[in-house]
Image: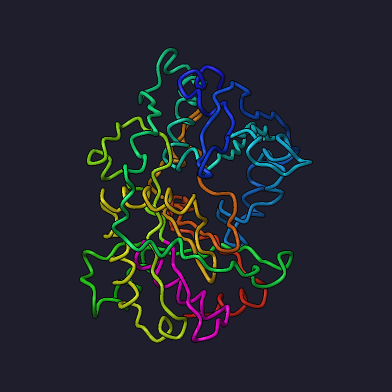
Amino acid sequence: MSQALVHYYPLAGRLREVEGRKLVIDCNGDGVLFVEADADVQIAEIEAAAGGGHGLLMPPFPFVDQLIPDVQVSGSVVSGNVLSCPLVGIQVTRLLCGGFVVGHSFNHNVCDPMGVVHFMNAVADLAAGRRPAQPAVQPTWSRELLDARIPPSPAFQHREYDDTVTPPVRGDADDHVLRSFVFSSTDISALKEASSSLQPLATTTTFELLAAFLWRARTAALEIAPEEEVRLVTVVIFRRIATQLGLPSGYYGNTCVYPTVVMTAGALLGCTLGEVVRLVREAKAAVTAEYVRSTADHLVLRGRPCLCRKNHFVLTDVRRVGFDRVDFGWGEPAYGGPARAQPTVSLLVNVKGRNDAEDVVAIPISLPSTAMERFAVID
């Protein structure tokens, strides 16, 4: 890992806040958090206890907090100031069966999921002896390529940053239940048929379908008042337009923007699935080079605002990012993806089927227990 950090040296620094609440990295070489551990369990035992009874290796995982290092504790547990924390934490836990778990946490201000995979692949290549000198993809920092324009001139409304009072999390935080919901190719085909009145089947993506379906189901399960606004925040990694922004292939910084669909809960639940799919598609399609530049301008003018968190649901797709292909020399992992979900944030992840069965899409969802009971039976 220390060899990989030579090429990814900003990851060994610490965040600092400067004028205008702008975040910068102090490349002070303080390093990353690395933990070695042993667990008296086998991978088969973890698989049996994971996934909420599906028998698949996916969230929720048993004793997950013991498999991922807590970078905040290692940084500044007294002050709670995340600016003093390591940007990266990695823990390798050896299992009785000879397998191991690599749990990691990265500061999202610094890297997006693809940037994380770039770094982990560099570590894996060095660990396996495949590339003793240079990473396969030459890492590039160059954060200035995404700086705001002078003068800043936002061209979009950016409702993802609406200035509203953040409400408390619905339900007792200790009462939240985490479950993964699994969608097979048959399930996805059925959803496509249900939405086909407005969308051509061939062009409807799995993300659009599941985002629309889950947003409606989650809103209904939470019993949000019909007149209240609800938000679907679609996390878009804009590397597909990287060349238009001058980003090299080895750029490992954060390339996420958050186009958001906003409507009242009553209007959402009154829409057909196909109508919501169309809204999700339009939000994603808005992400152009100009949208990215506009976002940077908006953030500067607003002094780095937070995402609007009132009745919001954040969804991203990490199935093709590459977590499940990082190879430390023992082959592809049995599972690669998020270890858990937050109360308002979920991810689409690819999960390997058992006994040569087809892969499935899993989405970990966290809800208050009573809302989860309603969510689980929504058709």
Residue at figure coordinates x 50%, y 23% from the top left: 9
The image quarter containing residue 88 is: top right
Tell me: 257 left or right of 70: left
Residue at figure coordinates x 56%, y 51% from the top left: 57
Magenta stretch, residue numbers: 207-233
**The residue positioned farthest toward the top in the image shown:** 133
Please state the horizontal and vertical placement of residue 263, each as a whole percent of the image.
41, 77
Nearer the observer, 133 or 5: 5
Give the tally of numbered discs. Answer: 0
The quadrant in which the N terminus is found is top right
Residue at figure coordinates x 75%, y 42% from the top left: 79
Please state the horizontal and vertical placement of residue 251, each as a whole percent of the image.
36, 32
**The residue positioned farthest toward the right in the image shown:** 78
The image quarter containing residue 102 is: top right
Please state the horizontal and vertical placement of residue 294, each as a whole percent of the image.
32, 52
Identify the coloring: rainbow
The image quarter containing residue 160 is: bottom left
